């Protein structure tokens, strides 16, 4: 066999090989470039298109759970309404941003064009209400009160209303059974925001763009349980949108129901008599200001002593929470938040702070015993008490001679507490406190739970204030520059005070300590704090976290999670001191400052305990306080600028007790008329289908008051009825 030499290849063969190599390399480069273009350059775009072409999601909102009273009566539930909504995304695609469509819609709905347009604009820092604070990509409700005729017009003329839908939808309803409003306790809903959606993405309870979220009250506290889980159905479709099959179907899970300790019947009674007390206070003349009392705000709390459960919580002024359903109007929003609104959204039972006046005296009484004073000792109660050149008057400038601490509570003697507090202030070093200063009066207030939250299961509770030495220092640091600047003028009284505060505002002065001892000065408390304290005295000393939620029941009724009472400690008093204070408070109701409000009360059968309070506030009329308890319940009421404790709040508190225990004006009990003669221990009955038994409730109608007898008219109110 012969070998062909390398030099034997013809030039033509070599050229062909080179061309083939070039073609192969060119093809590889072309394929590589195309792959880079598809996978890198436009990879994200094609991935999105592929996803959109092959899977589509249909979201089914979950039915929100109900909020029930202690007997199973719905106080917040859902009802089906005709909801007209607008797709902002579709409207923005139109040349005029949908203005013409919205104008037509306004005409059909009998609304003003500006009102409809305002519903679909997005909220920001500069946009006034009404506006939409939810996701811009979900349908925006225009109204949830459309009539069938209006809905039919929109659906039959769909070509005239692109982007507009009219569908039956389950919306929130605040039922107000028996005319029990319960607004601030329940709260309200508004659409979820993009920020909230993003924040909850990695949690076990993510939001959907269609979700409504609790913004205050129970709706916020138990939002996760009430909201449930929306259903998502995923369909496989081709690139033309034709359904090829169902990929996955996650059914909607309805929200659980929250059973509360609120009794709708008692709630209606409490709201009625709080409002009535405020109306009557406005008719009373205030001799100090020479005008009628303003009675501009008030609150009342009814609490179970042995559990801390809240039976009723009312705040006035109030509002209709249904105003938020379907989007709030600009007019309603102004009514709720404007300067002249007096802020009805505020739950004054947990957010209203005021000086407590004499209902605070159970705390300095305890502090005095801690400091070594005998509860049954003898203490002077003159009509006034002087420190340097300043005189502090007993209320109504009345003296009672030498009395015990128990008697000082009974007759509400200020001067006893003035001297005790002043003496302790001096022992602690006065303006130059000792390093080991005991500060009994301030430490005891903290031990009673003041200056911090009670732990109630409602959002935005405030802490109140105990103006101790540390608070004085912090407050002085925060205000020193302003005081010094104002004090340079040194002309008017306020400027001289500012100069004094500039120099010595960090010091605990004798006058500060004296004012504090009777619950005045810089001291601030909330009604829920004082209700917690008095219910703790009633139950033997256990301080419970106040609770409104009682149980969470799944939609099918199979799972029941009871919310059990929790304690955050005990009162700083032993059994003997508790019994001593308990006896003194019983004397207040039978022969002390509250006795005239409990005439005819069956004291042997249902022992009543009380403490009145009238707090004097600089620049305002006095604040009325009334704190009471029986073996079962504690009721605390306050009325801002309402007058005296027993004069303004006393009659209303008595009426609430009468309704709960079924008592008439003479103290005779009729258990058939009693709303809640003893605390309800069981949960509402769950039916076989998972629904909860809901008894009917009638609107509360108080009996017409009987005219006073001739003897009562001649006797009139007690001589010391103006006392706190």
Image (cartoon, grey):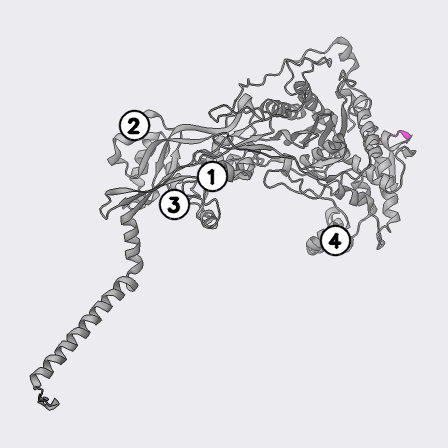
Q: Position of residue 553 (x, y in %)?
A: 53, 32
Q: Residues within 10 Å of mark 2 (few under 14, many from 20)?
A: some
Q: Secondary structure at mark 3?
A: loop
Residue 119 seen in the current view: yes
**CA separation in Å, label 4 and label 1:** 41 Å
Q: What is the crowding at mark 1: few (fewer than 14 residues within 10 Å), some, or many (at least 20)?
A: some
Mark 2 → mark 4, Cα distance in angstroms: 68 Å
Picture quadrant where residue 585 is located? top right
Residue position for label 4? 473
Picture mark count: 4
* Front in this rendered view, residue 79 or 344: 79
Mark 3–mark 4 contact, CB under 8 Å?
Answer: no
State yes or no: residue 557 in magenta.
Answer: no
In the image, which is nearer the foreground, mark 4 or mark 1? 1
Determine whether the residue tagged by mark 1 lies in a helix, strand or loop: strand
Q: Residue furthest top?
A: 710
Bounds of the magenta segment: 397-402
Q: Is residue 225 left or right of residue 397?
A: left
Residue identifier under label 3: 136
Whole-angstrom CA distance, mark 3 to mark 4, is 49 Å
**In the figure, is residue 389 to the left or right of 506?**
right
Which residue bears the numbered disc 1?
190
């Amino acid at each position: 066999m012969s070998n062909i030499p390398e030099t034997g290849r013809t030039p033509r063969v070599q050229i062909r090989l080179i061309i083939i190599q070039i073609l192969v390399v060119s093809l590889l480069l072309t394929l590589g470039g195309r792959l880079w273009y598809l996978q890198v350059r436009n990879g994200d775009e094609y991935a999105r298109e592929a996803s959109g072409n092959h899977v589509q999601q249909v979201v089914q909102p979950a039915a929100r759970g109900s909020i029930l009273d202690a007997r199973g009566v719905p106080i917040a539930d859902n009802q089906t309404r005709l909801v007209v909504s607008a797709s902002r995304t579709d409207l923005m695609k139109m040349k005029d941003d949908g203005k013409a469509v919205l104008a037509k819609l306004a005409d059909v709905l009998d609304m003003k064009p500006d009102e409809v347009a305002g519903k679909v604009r997005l909220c920001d820092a500069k946009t006034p209400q009404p506006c939409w604070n939810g996701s811009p990509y979900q349908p925006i409700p225009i109204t949830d009160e459309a009539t069938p005729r209006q809905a039919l017009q929109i659906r039959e003329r769909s070509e005239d209303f692109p982007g507009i839908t009219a569908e039956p939808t389950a919306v929130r309803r605040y039922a107000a059974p028996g005319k029990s409003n319960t607004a601030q306790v329940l709260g309200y809903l508004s659409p979820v925001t993009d920020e909230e959606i993003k924040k909850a993405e990695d949690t076990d309870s993510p939001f959907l763009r269609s979700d409504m979220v609790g913004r205050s009250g129970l709706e916020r506290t138990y939002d996760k349980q009430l909201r449930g889980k929306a259903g998502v159905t995923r369909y496989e479709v081709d690139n033309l949108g034709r359904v090829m099959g169902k990929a996955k179907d996650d059914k909607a899970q309805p929200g659980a129901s929250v059973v509360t300790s609120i009794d709708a019947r008692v709630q209606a009674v409490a709201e009625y008599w709080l409002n009535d007390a405020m109306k009557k206070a406005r008719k009373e003349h205030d001799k100090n200001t020479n005008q009628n009392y303003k009675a501009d705000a008030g609150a009342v709390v009814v609490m179970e002593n042995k559990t801390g459960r809240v039976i009723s919580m009312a705040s006035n002024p109030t509002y209709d929470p249904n105003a938020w359903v379907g989007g709030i109007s600009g007019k309603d929003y102004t009514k709720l938040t404007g300067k002249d609104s007096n802020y009805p959204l505020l739950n004054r039972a947990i957010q209203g702070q005021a000086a407590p006046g004499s209902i605070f005296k159970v705390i300095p009484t305890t502090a005095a015993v801690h400091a070594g004073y005998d509860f049954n000792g003898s203490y002077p109660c003159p009509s006034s008490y002087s420190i340097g050149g300043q005189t502090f008057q007993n209320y109504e400038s009345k003296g009672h001679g030498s009395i015990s601490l128990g008697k000082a509570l009974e007759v509400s003697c200020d001067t006893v507490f003035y001297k005790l507090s002043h003496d302790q202030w001096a022992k602690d070093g006065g303006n130059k406190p000792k390093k080991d200063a005991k500060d009994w009066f301030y430490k005891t207030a903290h031990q009673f739970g003041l200056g911090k939250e009670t732990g109630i299961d409602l959002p935005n509770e405030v802490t109140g204030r105990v103006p101790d030495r540390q608070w004085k220092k912090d407050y002085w640091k925060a205000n020193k520059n302003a005081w010094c600047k104002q004090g340079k003028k040194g002309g008017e009284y306020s400027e001289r005070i500012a100069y004094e505060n500039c120099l010595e505002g960090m010091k605990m002065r004798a006058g500060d300590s004296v004012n504090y001892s009777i619950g005045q000065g810089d001291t601030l408390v909330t009604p829920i704090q004082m209700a917690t304290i008095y219910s703790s005295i009633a139950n033997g000393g256990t301080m419970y976290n106040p609770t409104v939620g009682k149980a969470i029941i799944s939609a099918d009724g199979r799972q029941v999670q009871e919310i059990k009472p929790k304690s955050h400690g005990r009162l700083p008093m032993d059994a003997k001191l508790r019994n001593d204070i308990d006896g003194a408070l019983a004397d207040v109701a039978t022969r002390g400052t509250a006795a005239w409000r409990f005439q005819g009360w069956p004291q042997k059968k249902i022992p009543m305990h009380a403490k009145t309070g009238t707090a004097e506030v600089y620049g305002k009329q006095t604040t009325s306080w009334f704190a009471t308890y029986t073996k079962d319940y504690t009721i605390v009421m306050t009325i801002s600028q309402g007058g005296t404790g027993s004069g303004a709040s006393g009659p209303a508190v008595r009426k609430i007790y009468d309704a709960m225990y079924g008592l008439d004006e003479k103290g005779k009990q009729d258990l058939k008329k009693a709303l809640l003669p003893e605390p309800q221990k069981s949960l509402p009955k769950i039916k076989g289908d998972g629904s909860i038994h809901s008894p009917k409730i009638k609107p509360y109608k108080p009996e017409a008051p009987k005219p006073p007898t001739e003897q009562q008219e001649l006797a009139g109110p007690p001589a010391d009825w103006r006392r706190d």
